Amino acid sequence: MAKLYRASLFVIVILLIFSTTQNSFGEKLEINKILTDQKLINKKIDHILNKFNKKDYTVSGEEFLAIEKILNQQKKINSKIDIIRKNLNNNINQTPANDNYLYLTEEIEYFSKRLDKVERKSILDRIKLGGELRTRIDQYAYDQYAYKDNLGNNQEKDGHINELWSNRLRLNMRSDITQNLIFHGRLSYFKLAGDTNYSALLFDSNKPSIPDASGNIHVERAYVDYFLDTLPVSFTVGRIPTSEGPPSEFRENTTRKATWPKLFLDGENDGIILNIDTDNITGLNNSMFRVGYTKSYQNFENYKGIAIDDTRSIAFAYETEIPSLDDSILWASFCKIWKVRPLINVDPSTGFSVLSYPESTCDVDLYNIHLQLKNIINSGLDFFASFSYQKANQSDQGTILGMYNPEFGGIVPVAELGLFSDSLSGNLGENRYGHAVYAGIRYKIPIEVLNFPKIGFEYNYGSEHFLGAIMISGSGEIINKLGVNGSVFEIYYIQPIIKKHMFLRVGGVYFDYDYYNPYFIWGSQQGSNMTVKNSYLLMDIRF
Amino acid sequence: MIKSFVVVIIIIIFCIFLIYPNGFCTEGKQLFINKCAQCHNQSKEENQKTKLLSPAKYASIQWIRFFKRNKHKRYKDIGSLFTKEELALIINYLIDHAADSDLPIAAGIR
């Protein structure tokens, strides 16, 4: 009996001590009262126990009642303890505070695992890399292909390339060096599948379009944007983004990837651009005034007496989004190019060689306006139209070509070539004027099951003396359609396979030449009936 | 021959356009601007309490996780403000313009 009381007393005290550490002030008062009651009971129990320990002691009726009273009090205390215990359990399992505690614990564990990886990666990754891989198969059918034979005579023949595979890899880089200094870069690899005998004259402007026979990687872009803190002005310096500009994004199924519209200038370029954000001045969204200075040819060997002038250009451009037409572009620009370099080498397989060349071919004025509308009145229809006009003031001296003459026993001069002119035609030194138009539509077909495929149609025309062959040649395609002096039609269908990451494009291009010049812009234009049919299938992977 | 080809192509595209009119809308963007921006104000002067919000705040997978784990509820329950369809459009817009989406590139554009 006595052991039972002491044991119950011990349990009660332990529970009370625990409860006093966990509960509020009101609960503490209640617990103190219970402790006081318990002390009184203890004293009474001790008193009775002392009597019980005496020999021959018999319990009186009063004492029996006293013990019963004590037991009743103890029952009440036990019931109070039960209530306290129940409250404690409720506190642990049901209060909102503990809900949050458990949720946060779970979240913290979850985040800490993820954060370790992210932190390590962010410390190590100073440059963000993105990639584009394109595998493409082309078929070409040439009708009355114009070329010059070994004797320099114009010839025509039909021909075809049934299956031309190529791979292109681009690695895009971006580094936010500081909030105001951002680096962009692009490394590019473009190669026909396997070994090939393909060759072409290479300029900076057409490098994105010419497959490299050995598959070397080259730097297509490397520039920084530096934004001033106090003014809405920035500078873009380096190998600037000037190839595959608007509206390339429609056909390429991507976002805008360069500064100038394609029909203005298209190709790789080194220079500096001053960008003035005029949003706050004009109230127009995405409006910007730009002044660009580029050097597209530098004569490093001037000190050796090789006299070729450097080619410099300066461009002024203004663009804006048309009010209430989201993502639209309205563009107007002018560019002055001084001292376009002369023809300094020719394909040896033609039998010609260069005997001499002038310091420059011409100065050129370029004008361009471009309009681009996206998702017209929420229809899924996109539209663009571009117009360029060029005026070239050329010198009256051209590149002198020679050819081996067996009778003479050496190379003799046969022709002098200037800009779309030559000595044989008697038009050397004449100024040249050219223009071009480029327009197209694209429609996003609202079929969700097919991942919203797109269908597009494009048309472009270049006049007889339009300089597209060298100035707009960064298309990334082997036949540069905007360089054609004639008409070109293209239809394409884009099938997304994995949203944002994988696309197929199938298309057909019809080139209808009015003029064709194997020396690009040098030598008189020859009328041509040549047509080329190109069909292609390509797969783009972006990551 | 070529002229006929061009005419046929334009007619085909026009027919597709007629069959599937109003195919692609910018509802997600409009909802984002009209509804989300009520709290996530784009103007610093008007409301400094709520953080400015741009789809580029998170990568697409982070946006997906944000809504899958219903994290917005911890700050404010938006269940009553949007229908399921509206929320789906907004989430689509956020994913399409997330930090890892194909960003435009041109001189002087961040």
Image (cartoon, coloured by chain):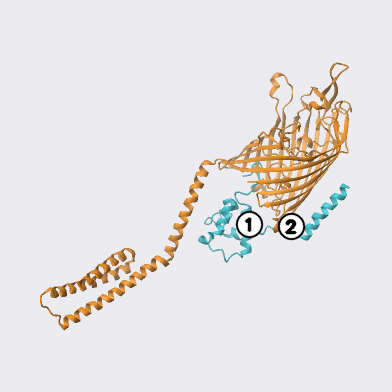
Chain colours: A orange, B cyan
Where is residue A51, by image quadrant? bottom left
Write down the chain letter for disc 2: A
Whether residue A475 is visible to the viewer of this picture, yes or no, is no
Q: Secondary structure at mark 1?
A: helix
The three-letter code of the residue at mark 2 reads: Ser
Is residue A254 positioned above or below A470 on the image? below
Residue for badge 2? A379
Q: Give the camera-side residue of A447 and A270.
A: A447
Answer yes or no: is residue A149 visible: yes
Neighbours of disc 2 within 10 Å: few (<14), some (14-19), many (20+): many
Residue A185 or residue A110, whichever sits in front: A110
Question: Which numbered marker is on residue B92?
Answer: 1
Residue A175 position, x and y percent, is 58, 41
Q: Are marks 1 and 2 in contact (CB under 8 Å)?
A: no
Horizontal side, residue B40 vs residue A52: left or right = right
Q: Is residue A175 left or right of residue A514?
A: left
For disc 1, the neighbor class at 10 Å (few under 14, some 14 to 19, many from 20) is some
Q: Position of residue A47 (x, y in %)?
A: 15, 74
- Measuring from the top left, give residue B99's x and y in whole percent: 59, 49
**Residue A32 horizontal/vertical position (percent):** 27, 69
Please determine whether, in this image, residue A435 is positioned above or below residue B82: above
Tag 1 and tag 2 share a subunit:
no
Tell me how far mark 1 sits from mark 2, CA to CA. 18 Å
Question: Given the image, on which type of amino acid does mark 1 rest?
Answer: Asn
